[in-house]
Image: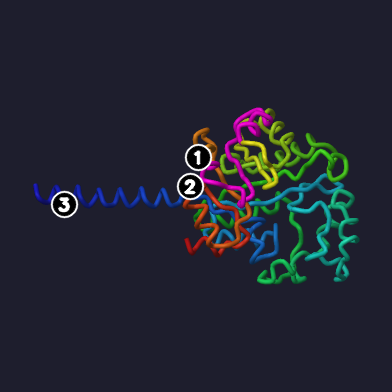
Amino acid sequence: MYRFYKVVLFLGFLLLGNVSFAQKKKFDTQAHRGGRGLMPENTIPAMLDAIDRGISTLELDLQLSKDLKVVVSHDPYFNANFVTTPAGDTLTKDAGKKNILYQLNYDSIAKYDVGQKVNPEFPQQKKMKVHKPLLSDLLNATEAYSKKKRTTIHYNIEIKSAPGNDGKYYPNLEAFVDLAMDVINKKKISKRVIIQSFDTRALQMMHKKYPSYALSYLILAKEKRPIAELIKVLGFVPDVLSPQYNMVTGTMVKECHQQGIKIVPWTVNELKDIQSLKAMGVDGIISDYTDLFSQL
């Protein structure tokens, strides 16, 4: 009988340990643009580095090329802070903004380097020759690498649309959404993908046309409307609310959780802020510095 109780007690400790581990793993660590504090943003090497660091979710942005290829890029043009021309020349800010991705075929976009010039905003970035990837190529690489590493990775993918950009950076919103979702659907990763946007139109379109996908509503700090009003305007309850980190309060976290909404702030680049937000009860953090998560 004594041995029986010892076995039960031992199994109990194992169970408690596993529960604790599972609870810890539920906190969503997201690599903003792949972790641009350490690697060239929105590139395949950045995403693989984030996987190596044990990140649970890769955050990335989408744009379209002239030949309607889905490109992983935050900006709809070439950012002079870190992009160099095919000839290796630097760009002025004005020249960079005039080089709009939607006016170039992807084979031309791929000739621009986004990893060799020191980005003054992120001097710790590892320098390398690298280009803006196609979404399909990035997903092929991350899926193969995570499988090799015997880990499961999630994705937080932003539709970079706005009413004023319709017809300027993409044909129209529906075409943008459908082209992006066609790539994602073909990879059969829907259960591991969140689609996020500041654009309520994009979220509403996703909710209607692709109802099986989790959706995240991005919020700027200048937004003063209460959560209840934001949800009313959106027309449905999103899976995730992703506010700018400096607007998050304990009351906001509680209100989100009462409605079954997860809250994942962006972009949190100081360890003390990550710790403070985690103590408030947020469900995850989006950060440029993927190395900070190992210190939690």
In depth, the one of 102 and 197 nearer the eye is 197
Q: Quadrant of residue 99?
A: bottom right
Q: Residue at x 65, y 34 (%)?
A: 230
**Residue 32 coordinates in the image, percent (x, y):** 64, 55
Q: Which secondary structure lies at badge 2?
A: loop
Callout 1–callout 2 Cβ contact below 8 Å = yes
**Residue 20 coordinates in the image, percent (x, y):** 37, 51
Magenta region: which residues? 227-253
What separation in Å lies between label 3 and label 1 (alpha carbons)?
A: 41 Å
Label 1: how many Cα within 10 Å (few below 14, some 14–19, many 20+): some
**Residue 73 coordinates in the image, percent (x, y):** 75, 53
Label 3: how many Cα within 10 Å (few below 14, some 14–19, many 20+): few
Q: Which secondary structure lies at badge 3?
A: helix
Query: Is residue 219 in view?
Result: yes
Which of label 3 and label 2 is nearer to you? 2
Q: Which residue corresponds to mark 1?
A: 254
Q: Give the number of callouts.
A: 3
Q: Amino acid at mark 1?
A: Lys
Image-based side of 152 in relation to 232, left or right: left
In depth, the one of 207 and 269 nearer the eye is 269
Q: Which residue corresponds to mark 2?
A: 281
In depth, the one of 265 and 189 nearer the eye is 265
Q: Which residue corresponds to mark 3?
A: 6
Callout 3–callout 2 Cβ contact below 8 Å = no
Asked if residue 236 is among those painted magenta in the image, a careful observer would answer yes
Q: Is residue 118 above or below residue 203?
A: below
Callout 3–callout 1 Cβ contact below 8 Å = no
Q: Amino acid at mark 3?
A: Lys
Sequence-first tag of 3 and 2 = 3
Q: Is residue 124 above or below residue 157?
A: below
Q: Which secondary structure lies at badge 1?
A: helix
